[in-house]
Image (cartoon, grey):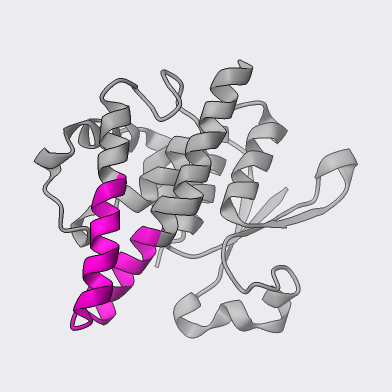
Amino acid sequence: MITLHTWATPNGRKISIALEELGLPYELRAVDIGRDQQFAPEFLALNPNNKIPVIEDSDGPCGQRLVLFESGAILLYLAEKSGRLLPADPVARLQAIQWLMFQMGGVGPTFGQTHHFRRYAPEQTYGLQRYSKETHRLYRVLDGHLAHSTYLAGDEYTIADIATYPWIARFELHALPWNQVPHVKRWFDTVGERAAVRRGMAVPKI
């Protein structure tokens, strides 16, 4: 059994979507970051970096219990555990990992800063402009790539799509018209139609 410690954030929703896609049974433990539950001693024992998501797998490698944090690492683990959501072809597999790293190193940190400044410090025009400009640049990178690719790693839906979708789902915070990134919009609608994605985006119910 897998225990998922999470909250309703893009990083948390990556893992709930993956678990729903894979059909792996899991137990939910909501960690209300608005109430600083991520700083509780019992949570810090799982992740000293006090961030969600975290999984505990009672049937980890070699049948041993595994505790794992960092959403990208968790996605790779779940894909390897199940043999799904990563291509078997070595080149396509590396391309999926490449776009997963693009999300982890670019989309997540940049979009997160844009969300912060837009919601909590809009008067800080330098910060908002800086991160909005980079957010728009990353959209253009995605749009150019998706003009020639069904999914981020080609024709196969992978953990790279799962990692990126919850961040694009906060599109209203990005101050960018959809018609400027039509290929991202096509991809976003395609991924969003998946039943497992809809279920995963609703975890946890708050």
In percent of width and height, residue 69 lies at 66, 59
Q: List the single residue furthest toward the top.
A: 89
175 and 171: which is toward the camera: 175
* Picture quarter with the C terminus: bottom left
Q: Residue 114: within the magenta?
A: yes
Q: Main secondary structure of the magenta part?
A: helix
Tell me which corner region of the image, top left, top right, bottom left or bottom right, holds residue 199.
Answer: top left
Query: Which residue is at 68% across, 74% downward?
Result: 43
Q: Tell whether 193 sits left or right of 196.
A: left
110 and 168: which is toward the camera: 110
Q: Residue 104: within the magenta?
A: no
Q: Which residues are magenta?
A: 110-138
Q: Tell whether 31 sits left or right of 155.
A: right
Q: Tell whether 86 sits left or right of 138.
A: right
Query: Which residue is at 29% across, 55% downward?
Result: 135
Query: Which residue is at 65% across, 72% downward?
Result: 49
> Can the viewer see residue 159?
no
* Numbered disc total: 0
In percent of width and height, residue 60 lies at 80, 45
In percent of width and height, residue 197 lies at 40, 40
Tell me which corner region of the image, top left, top right, bottom left or bottom right, holds residue 149.
Answer: top left
Query: Which residue is at 70% across, 73% downward?
Result: 48
